[in-house]
Amino acid sequence: MKSTTKEGVIPCSRGDSRLNAILAFAAGILIGVPLTLGLLWAHDEYYRNKANGLPDPFLPVPRAEMDSRRSGPVQNSSSPLPLVASLLVRKTKSSSFTVPNSLFATQPTPAAEQGAPAAKKFRFEDIAEGVYWSPLAEKQVPRGFDDDDLRLWKRLLNNTEVRGLEEGCGRMQNRLLTLAGGGKSCCRYRHNNDQIQGEIFSFYLGRHLGIRNLVPSSLALVDSRARRWSAAAPQIALARWSPERPVVLTQFVEDLQPAFIPPQFRTKSRRRLHPIRQDLGNLTADQVSQLVQWSDLVLFDYLTANLDRVVNNLFNERWNPEMMRQPTHNLAKTRSGLLLFLDNESGLLHGYRLLEKYEHFHRTLLDALCVFRRDTAAVVERLHASGDVEHVLRDAFHGLDPGMRDWLPFLPERSLRTLRKRITHVAEHIRTCKARFAFQESAVLQTPLNIPHSNSKKETHVPCHNLGTSGLFSLQQGASNLSEELKNHLMHQSEMAPELTPTAEQRKRKASTGRLPYALL
């Protein structure tokens, strides 16, 4: 019987189909393997370039800016265009080898620096939620450094040789390192381990608190015989560095500007940042951004007892009344508005030894603050409740710098005890602020105040709603348009506010009038 086939169709034997499958598989390998290797190489080069600050990525993706006339959230000027759109834009050349701003901040240059009209002012209600900054307020802060930036920095250090040293980065013994590929690092060298411990463990603590104003840092061991340091051996000898000494390598950030103390903390007679309209009303986006970061700075410096920043200005104010208007020591600002908390080596050890002399200045700053980042306050509360800050710091030490345990000791027990006490004090301070201003908000409703006159049995009827949302606290601070009797009465009532259990007499009054006294609402 003859086999028939459809016209125009060539029959394919089973052997041919197997050959085609083998050829297709081989073609997939020949095409897929080189493509996969190329993509992996491009991925590695991208992260290396980002950490080194090299200007030209593997795939040139141009940058774009959002039209300032458009509404909606401001987009970072360094954000890339979609890849398809980027192919239609001509690539521009750059010869600079600097660390890109996108590595540590995502906010664009302030409008005032671009010659744009002045930014609008924020209402008090928009930026404060009780004793916490609102989400809108926190959105004004540049992104800062996160865990990805730290991983990139460590990856760069572990795969890059030191090409040279030069003077810079503050103290005489510090050096500015030039890394292979054009990257730079500040190398902090000390003969005393206390300051190295203070620097790196303050970094660990700040990282755990979620503070993103600390530049990525890593421990390293200086050894001119090692391949990593051999190219800079002559300069290491000139610097008179002892062999095999632990150092802190911090990412170098260029184009920094001086940072100043906000007006809310300058004046001694009115040093205060509280969630009230007088302190937080009518602020620009830049002012809100700075104050949010300063609230973290005050808590961080109090916990570590840092002597070389704001306390330095406060201490010297007695000789120079204008000291609080001078640039803040060891605090810098990027063009995006991100504050950098630099030089934390006095924290946790040296600062703790001098608490008897400087604790007054630390308390002055902390007592002046009653508005916080919600996440920072939550971490402080967790550390206070668990009491495991030692384990947190030890895990960070072993996890981030695992090879340094034999070269740098852990914090002494005395420092850990002091740190736990200061965490407890900060947690109690936050609770006090919450009770104080929660009472303020609940008291200033519609309930009238009946204030007795000093010279008569008559009572003055004062509607609470006329005092405003921050009326009680304003009165406590000395409102000049009210009598001293009224202010003293309100201050007395506010001091009694945390005791919210009504007495028998008050219950009897509620049964007859249908309401409790305003202090118990």
Image (cartoon, helix red, strand yellow):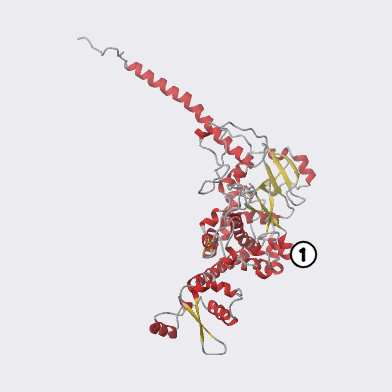
State the SS at label 1: loop
Q: Is residue 239 left or right of residue 119?
A: right
Q: Is residue 238 left or right of residue 228?
A: right
Q: Is residue 356 left or right of residue 490?
A: right
Position in image of residue 447 (x %, y %): 46, 76
Relative depth, front residue between 126 and 199: 126
Which residue in the rendered view is the most extreme toward the top? 2
Q: Quadrant of the C terminus?
A: bottom left
Which residue in the rendered view is the most extreme toward the bottom? 456
Q: Kindly identify the amino acid type of the residue bearing the numbered disc 1.
A: Asn
Q: Quadrant of the N terminus?
A: top left
Relative depth, front residue between 448 and 288: 448
Relative depth, front residue between 97 and 19: 97
For image coordinates 58% across by 48% down, the residue present is: 107
Relative depth, front residue between 491 and 485: 485
Residue pointed to by mark 1: 320
Q: Residue 53 occupies which quadrant of the picture?
A: top right
Q: Residues within 10 Å of mark 1 (few under 14, many from 20)?
A: few
Q: How many marks?
A: 1
Which residue in the rendered view is the most extreme toward the right? 238
Position in image of residue 453 (x %, y %): 55, 86
Classify 405 as above or below 437.
Answer: above
Classify 278 as above or below 49.
Answer: below
Position in image of residue 186 (x %, y %): 70, 47
Classify 439 as above or below 393.
Answer: below
Position in image of residue 305 (x %, y %): 66, 63
